[in-house]
Image (cartoon, rainbow, N blue to C red):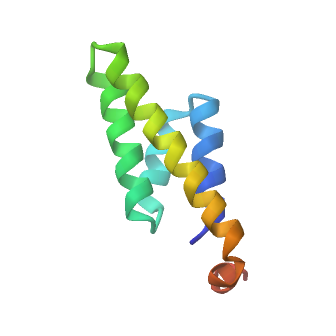
Amino acid sequence: MNTMDYDRALYYTHRSEWDNLLILMVRTKDDLLSKKIEYFLHAYHFEHDYSVIEKRLTSLLRYIDHATETAEQFPEDNMYHLT
């Protein structure tokens, strides 16, 4: 698990940097993070119902929170990412 991807996703979402978020979606090795970003960006650009956009954003943010907490609980799993 690379926690930098979660930090970047949170930062790009907070700053509304959708192009950077799209690039992160393609580059991350976390398939779930990639899917959550994909669903959010698709809803943001094509959905007319704001509640759907809000639902996708909340789902993305919850996943980032969950993944970050998991990475903090099991830091030995992240050792191979430190270079």
**Up-down: is 7 above or below 60?**
below
- The one nearer the camera, 59 or 21, is 59
In percent of the image, x 54 and y 41: which residue is there?
Answer: 61
- The one nearer the camera, 54 or 21, is 54
Query: Could you tell whether 51 is left or right of 29 in the image?
Result: left
Please say whether residue 20 is visible from this viewpoint.
no
Query: Could you tell whether 39 is left or right of 66 in the image?
Result: left
Q: Position of residue 23 (x, y in %)?
A: 46, 50
- The one nearer the camera, 18 or 72, is 72
In percent of the image, x 30 and y 33: which residue is there?
Answer: 42
- The one nearer the camera, 21 or 60, is 60
Res 6 → quadrant:
bottom right
Res 73 → quadrant:
bottom right
Please say whether residue 80 is visible from this viewpoint.
yes
Q: Position of residue 20 (x, y in %)?
A: 53, 43
Instruction: Locate the N terminus by quadrant.
Output: bottom right
